[in-house]
């Protein structure tokens, strides 16, 4: 079992695209003066394409990873197992004070599990979110990661209640706000003007001169894109939506593969739908911040649109981020075509939800995390000691 000391670094883990905007402000805060905390960065390699990784590291100023496990894509079991196998010897050699994981992707649970079994403290940022839908792989990752975490940082107060219900000790939970919104607020001034992106359209005027503005769409959840029938229904819905508002659609690699395999490419073939490859952070932020509405199945985008005050329609039956519905601009519309089209029409007619920005989504979450971590390390990581001793 490794010994927790103040001098050992915090080993921060990233793996997939939504992790990058969360780790960026954490690395910056930990390494900032006047009292930097030693931190090292490990990338599992879950996402590896230039568009899925490099663009984010460059634009968000994330330091090159100190360690890259280069696992790549595979089935859930193979990917999770490969990360674990490659992470174990690294952890043995690094002997960090703690392993810090973010979000809910396979890299999150894989590294948390290895650390926990090696007696290394686990810190989970974005803990306690629950969709209560165990058919989502991310829900499994969330529940399990939280159970083996020593310090849990939450983005909204409901998360604390979820954790308490699952028996997590109150003293381990800290409500600090949302690190993804730290990144959003910090980069808004550099966001790409959408007109620059519309240059890729066959007729850019459809988008830049549209009286209704444009809708931004992202779809990548296995539940929405892996079944050809559901995918076809959603693409046909998008096509009909595009008749009332032009659609900008950056397509995730998973979705692109499924569209091609199902022979559905023609469904998007209209000058009113702009198909794009996955975008970098600043392009996406630029498009999101000026959209009339956003249609998405992403978790992060539900939060980003709430912070920006842009109406969001979530193409899922539930959300692990209820605050975006209760306080923000988010509406859950599911995958039923008529419901989606009615919700779009309502926004075009009435403006959509205005919402307000949730508590502590103020750009300072990473610094709050650092403050808590500082105290916790000074006290010798007390949660860990109690857990190992079985108290
Ligand atoms: C993963 C996360 C999901 C997150 C999403 C954001 C899990 C369980 N899921 O899903 O929570 O919302 O990332 O993107 O961790 N691929 C590439 N290039 C890459 C990475 C992937 O082409 O750099 C392709 C591969 O064909 C791969 C597929 O995308 O098989 C899916 O990638 P994977 O990491 O398995 O899951 P995501 O759907 O991206």
Image (tube, helix red, strand yellow):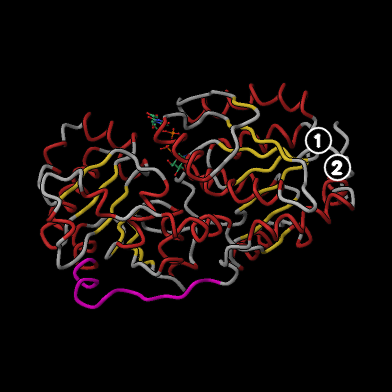
At x 24% / y 59%, what residue is drawn? 215
> Disc 2, ligand 1: is the CB inside 8 Å?
no
Does residue 151 sit above or below 137 in this rendering? below
At x 15% / y 51%, what residue is drawn? 204
SS class, disc 2: helix
Which quarter is ligand 1 in?
top left
As for residue 98 lying within the magenta part, the answer is: no
Decide: few, some or many residues near mark 2? Use Cα within 10 Å; few <14, some 14-19, many ≥20: few
Q: Which mark is residue 119?
A: 1
Q: Which of pointers 1 and 2 lies earlier in the amino acid sequence?
A: 1
Check if mark 1's residue and mark 2's residue have beta carbons within 8 Å.
yes
**Where are the magenta residues, as a range?**
344-358
In-front residue for pair 61/124: 61
Q: Is residue 234 left or right of residue 155?
A: left
Extreme-bottom residue of the structure: 350
SS class, disc 1: loop
Spatial CA distance of label 1 from label 2 is 8 Å
At x 72% / y 56%, what residue is drawn? 168
Q: Quadrant of residue 70?
A: top right
In-front residue for pair 10/119: 10
Decide: few, some or many residues near mark 1? Use Cα within 10 Å; few <14, some 14-19, many ≥20: some
Of badges 1 and 2, nearer the viewer stands 1
Give percent across and percent down for residue 125.
63, 51
Quarter the N terminus occupies: top right
Give percent across and percent down for residue 379.
89, 53
For label 2, the residue is 388
Give percent across and percent down for residue 232.
19, 43
Does residue 119 sit above or below 303 in this rendering? above
> Disc 1, ligand 1: is the CB inside 8 Å?
no
Q: Is residue 70 left or right of residue 188?
A: right
Q: Is residue 25 left or right of residue 282?
A: right
């Amino acid at each position: 079992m490794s010994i927790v000391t103040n001098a050992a670094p915090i080993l921060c883990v990233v793996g997939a695209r939504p992790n990058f905007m969360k780790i960026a402000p954490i690395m910056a805060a930990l390494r900032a003066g006047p009292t930097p905390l030693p931190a090292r960065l490990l990338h599992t390699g879950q996402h590896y394409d230039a568009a899925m990784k490099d663009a984010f590291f460059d634009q968000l100023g994330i330091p090159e990873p100190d360690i890259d496990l280069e696992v790549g894509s595979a089935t859930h079991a193979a990917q999770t197992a490969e990360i674990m196998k490659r992470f174990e010897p690294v952890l043995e050699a690094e002997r960090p004070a703690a392993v810090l994981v973010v979000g809910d992707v396979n890299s999150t649970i894989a590294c948390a599990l290895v650390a926990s079994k090696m007696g290394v403290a686990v810190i989970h940022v974005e803990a306690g979110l629950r969709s209560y839908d165990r058919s989502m792989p991310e829900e499994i990752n969330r529940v399990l990661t939280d159970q083996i975490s020593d310090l849990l940082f939450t983005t909204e107060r409901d998360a604390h209640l979820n954790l308490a219900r699952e028996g997590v000790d109150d003293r381990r939970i800290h409500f600090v706000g949302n690190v993804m919104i730290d990144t959003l607020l910090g980069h808004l001034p550099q966001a790409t003007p959408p007109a620059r992106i519309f240059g890729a359209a066959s007729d850019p005027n459809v988008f830049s001169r549209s009286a209704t503005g444009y809708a931004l769409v992202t779809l990548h959840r296995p539940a929405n894109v892996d079944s050809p029938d559901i995918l076809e229904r959603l693409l046909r819905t998008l096509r009909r939506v595009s008749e009332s508002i032009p659609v900008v659609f950056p397509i995730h690699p998973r979705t692109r593969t499924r569209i091609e395999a199902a022979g559905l490419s023609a469904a998007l073939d209209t000058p009113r739908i702009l198909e794009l490859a996955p975008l970098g952070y600043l392009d996406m932020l630029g498009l999101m911040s000026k959209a009339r509405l956003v249609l998405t199945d992403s978790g992060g985008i539900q939060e980003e649109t709430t912070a920006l005050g842009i109406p969001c329609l979530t193409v899922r039956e539930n959300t692990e981020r209820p605050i975006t519905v209760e306080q923000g601009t988010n509406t859950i519309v599911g995958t039923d075509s008529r419901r989606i089209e009615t919700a779009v029409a309502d926004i075009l007619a009435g403006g959509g939800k205005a919402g307000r920005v949730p508590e502590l989504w103020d750009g300072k979450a990473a610094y709050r995390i650092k403050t808590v971590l500082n105290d916790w390390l000074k006290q010798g990581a007390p949660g860990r000691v109690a857990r190992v001793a079985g108290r």
